[in-house]
Image (tube, helix red, strand yellow):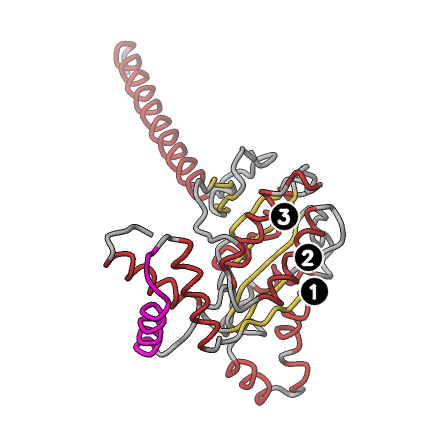
Amino acid sequence: MTAPQIAAYSKENRVSNERYLAEIAAALAGIAKSLEALAPPAAPEGLQIGEADAYHWDAQDARLLPVGRVARVPLAMLKGIDRVQDILLRNTEQFARGHGANNTLLWGARGMGKSSLVKAVHADIAERRNEGFERLILIEISREDIESLPALMRLLAGHPARFIVFCDDLSFDAGEATYKSLKSILDGGLEGRPENVIFYATSNRRHLMPRDMIENERSTAINPGEAVEEKVSLSDRFGLWLGFHNCDQPTFLAMVRAYADHYGLDIDDETLNARAIEWSQTRGARSGRVAIQLIRSLAGEMGKAV
């Protein structure tokens, strides 16, 4: 092989090698980009708490989203739940002062003001901060994100504010294991609940799971008592159980009147009561939710916004 041939061959090999290495580099860059996309977002060193009094926990990005306007009603408007209202208000006041307080499960009838009470109590105390309460922030966590609760608790620990972490309509179905994350936070876990955080949840189920699930596990287990003990004991870890029950007609009419007065609806008692009774009969229920639905309808008829 002549010198020119050797030079040409070397050049060809060099170009071929460079092309091959470039292809490898491109492939590696593509793999790195794919892995980066699959990796979970890096947890922030600390949560950025702004001026808002309420936030929603974004578990995917591990951040708090401020809620500019919370859908709530004044505490005085809630009727027919005086006893549980007093208990939750006292418990939350103790917590906002840095004293002992309990995680709370609000359970029972639909539409009777469970979530409304939590939001109203938070607003009431936030407005009375000059009475010696520390800053109180409400954080809503979705039922689907309960598994991220320990991570949220770690981020809140040590912050100067105090936090109510609130989950609305909490329950667990057969085969789910996410309840274990909640269980370790409520009581017994290595880290436990930070002293500046309290957990409130609402549920239609007292034991946070369907009765047929409990009965099925009890009937098929070698030791029926131990089969459901772990799941049932979850609700036992709430220090307070507050029960909400369907209301009677006088209480329902009082709810309707309170809403009508609050929104400035000019309607006499006789007409309002007749409309309320008819409305509840068509809905087959009497509750705070049914009451506010009637008020929205009446306000629309009067050309008013609610």
Q: Answer with mark 2 or mark 3, whichever residue precedes in sequence.
A: 2
* Percent of width and height locating residue 173: 49, 72
| Residue type beneath disc 2 | Asn
Mark 1 is surrounded, within 10 Å at the Cα level, by few (under 14), some (14 to 19) or many (20 or more) other residues, namely some
Foreground of the two, 276 or 86: 276
Tell me the quarter of the image containing the N terminus.
Answer: top left
Q: Nearer the viewer, mark 2 or mark 3?
A: 2
Confirm or deny contact between disc 1 and disc 2 (CB under 8 A).
Answer: no
x%, y% of residue 220? 57, 88
How far is the residue under mark 2 from the one under mark 3? 20 Å
Q: Nearer the viewer, residue 90 or 145?
A: 90
Residue placed furthest toward the right:
99
Prevalent SS, magenta region: helix
Residue at image mark 2: 91
Callout 1: SS: loop
Q: Which quadrant of the figure has residue 233?
A: bottom right
Q: Establish if 97 lies above or below 255.
A: above
Q: Amino acid at mark 3?
A: Met
For mark 1, what is the residue? 239
- Which SS class for mark 2? helix
Between marks 1 and 2 in the image, the one whose residue lies nearer the viewer:
2
Q: Is residue 110 above or below residue 187?
A: below
The verdict on residue 92 being magenta is no
Residue corresponding to mark 3: 153
Which sits in the foreground, 108 or 175?
A: 108
Give the magenta-colored segment's residue range: 265-283
Using the numbered discs, state the Cα–Cα distance from disc 1 to disc 3 in whole angstroms. Answer: 18 Å
- Residue nearer the viewer, 255 or 200: 255
Kindly state the secondary structure of the residue where label 3 is placed.
helix
